[in-house]
Amino acid sequence: MDIIQEAFLHVATWQTILALFCGVAIGTIIGAIPGMTVSMGVALTLPFTFTLDPVTGILLLLGVYKGGIYGGSITAIVIRAPGTPAASCTVLDGFPMAQKGEARKALEMALYASCIADFISNLALIFFAGFLASLALKFGAPEFFTLIVFSLTIIAGVSGDDLIKGLASAMLGLIGATVGLDLVYGTDRFVFGVYELMGGLSFIPVLIGLFALPEIINHYTHKDRGIGDINKIGSARLSLAELKGSLKSILRGSLIGVVLGAIPGIGGAPAAFLSYSEAKRTSPNGKNFGKGEVEGVAAAESGNNGVAGATMIPLLALGVPGDVITAVILGAFMVHGLRPGPILFQQNLDIIYALFMGIMMSSVFLFIIGKSSIRMFSRIAEIPNSILYPAVLILCVFGAYAINNTIFDILVMMAVGVLGFGMLKFGFPTAPFLIAFVLGPLLEDNFRQALLISQGDYGIFVRGPICWFFWALTVLSVVIVLNRTTGFLKFMKRQPKAGT
Amino acid sequence: MRGITLKATGWALALTAAFAVSSTAAVADGYPKKPVTIVAPYGPGGASDMATRTLAASAPNYLQQGVLSINKAGAGGTVGSTFVYKTRPDGYTLLLARVATHAVSPAMKNLPYKPMEFTILGLLEKNPFVCATSMEKPYKSLKDLLDAIKANPGKVTYSSAGVGTLLQVAGVMLIDEAGIPNANKAATHVPYKGGGPAALAALKGEVDFVCTNLSALIGHIQAGKLRALMTTMPERVASIPDVPTARELGYPGLEVAVGWSALVGPPKMDEEATKKWVDVLAKLKEDKSWNRMTQKLGSIPTIMSPEETRKFIEHSYSKMNALVEKLGMKIK
């Protein structure tokens, strides 16, 4: 009881509450700027925590993190430029909604889904940290590999009507992901003597190039668009019925986010896509996904926000940072002489409890800040396109540059933008490219690491229940896709002219 | 009318900018005139990033200007290092050099930069290095581990932060020092992307051992999950007093396997800027807050003069190079 009281005293200071509030606000803004990723936001805030009380400082960083994950969805919806990699899935339905004049509704759904998922993720952190941490430790290279193989079957779900074009798009993404140094031998791959390519293609420039640029090019190649053209005014609000209808997808997305978040090294983007494809597969609105379905936004956002609390599980319970953001937060702990892990639970339980209290409070702040910002952000969609598009273009260039402070990344963005425009013109879906680009390196690295560990024995890929579980899911998923495709073919035979 | 106003404003801006640039060039004696950028050649959260940020937090007191830390990650530090190598040597862009960028990678690979051509400003810190294994593995001592490697060449595995990192070379060096032939093949190297995942692989027992910065492992060692077999520091480390040093175990040659950070500038950097930074580092050596933060991050503050630092880096490089040459580990 004393410890809880002590923990409460840590949190219930005006400095801590202010830090948390500012953190969420700063995070939301940083997340909304393409190219300013959450990890950069957290890293930039870190030095300010050096002089703060440890609980205050760490909660400031957590606030930035939580706000940032949500903020990334704002520009994904309004201008098709996801602020963070994790928000790229939100583009798929969020932007079509904005085009239909439902930007406000999409933003509201993104906020509600984010807050609910965030809250569930926090509860998981507080009550199941021990269990989820031990699960995370069972994930070795072969388990990762099978999980990624299963995740790649999502591609079928986001390919639209043409599976072949979807697979072609995914192939391009995989090729893009191989640029850089070979993991095992350290040799150059597709580098062509350009040192900037040695580090591989950066994620954000590819993301912006793939989504935002084709939209802009497309706008300027349409001659019939007037100068004062604007999108329909977005006054449509989210109804309670729509929220209720999406609740199942939100809860499922939250759980997917929690489990994937607890496993070090996966991150928010795969969780969002997995949640999205599961929702698409099971929802009665499944066939509207990708055309501006509000449930799609709910699934994507709950998936990526479900990760936010859960990534703290391996950090606090094991002392293992699962991603760049938690690695920076680990630094903040260390600067204050604290070392996350089992020992922190024994020696500084008051700090752990104080963090838990602060984390719960952050969900509330996220809701308040998000709610008050939606009005402002949804009006962006009302800006005349003749002003909006040039402004977005500047933001894209800035975003591509800011991620690594190199001009080269702007070139990458432009090249990918041209590719993306070509894909748009010829009806190739871009989402499979992105998924393959994110998952490709994970697939390759874990495959090769597993074989190095097993000395070349392929039996390692069926070494335990987790591997079998994902293999079974993969087979199931492929069977469903094949069935759907062949069913689709039958339909095409009956009506040969359909769809032209 | 609007067009003309815009044009006029544009010209005015351009002229102001041109004037501003020429005026800074004219009064170059007042370095620094604007904030200085330090490039960390790795992503946020790692040892080099933290070293850059603690430096950026303390140095402005002595520099009388702000210090920005930015990350330029990629290709094991090569992207960030090459960027600073090619940048204008006016003293406003510096690099946080690491053992990997200035000793290990140059020994293993032809790089777009020459490490010793950088303007060396000073060593900042050393990171104690430790070799450890999971408690669930049968190796109770370094001897057990080396015996297992000897008995079954290629069967024992170890993790690293990637090709060309100290983690990879330290593993090979350990086996070579123990007199086991073909040291780079005697144990299987499993590369990961970064020191964090490499440490995690050892914690999970996915690999048999890892040699890495103590700061990445100390929590797991104290929690009884990892067993430290050896440190490469000359004396025992206070936080793990029971762990023998390489010297005690009869391998003093392993002491070169230690992580470090140094501050360097592009080749032929402006003399005044160089002097200023050498002076700043000398003052930082006495700075309580910088020393405290560095220690809390698990490093040993070790500020050296440029000459000492040059000798230190050259020694580090020549040892790595000798090993790489001997075992044919050069990447073509």
Image (tube, coloured by chain):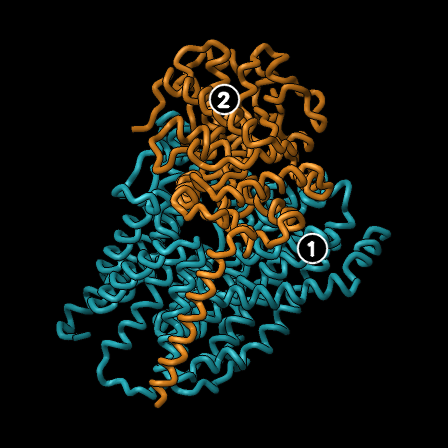
Chain colours: A cyan, B orange
Read off the chain for label 2.
B
Q: Position of residue B222 (x, y in %)?
A: 69, 31
Residue A292 shows in the view: no
Tell me the amino acid under the disc marked 1. Answer: Gly
Q: Is residue B44 left or right of residue A49?
A: left
Q: Which mark is residue A57?
A: 1
Residues at marks 1 and 2, CA–CA distance in whole angstroms: 40 Å
Q: Residue furthest right?
A: A2
Quadrant position of the C terminus of chain B in the picture? top left
Count residues near mark 1 (Cα–Cα under 10 Å), then give few for <14, some for 14-19, many for 20+: many
Q: Position of residue A11 (x, y in %)?
A: 77, 59
Q: Give residue A416's quadrant in the image.
A: bottom left
Q: Is residue A499 left or right of residue A80?
A: left
Q: Secondary structure at mark 2?
A: helix
Residue at 65% x, 43% y is A317
Front in this rendered view, residue A143 or B29: B29
Residue at 38% x, 85% y is B5
Q: Secondary structure at mark 1?
A: helix
Up the image or down, B321 lies above or below A484; here it is above
Q: Nearer the viewer, mark 1 or mark 2?
A: 2
Front in this rendered view, residue A191 or B55: B55
Q: Is residue A317 left or right of residue A378?
A: right
Q: Mark 2 — residue? A: B315
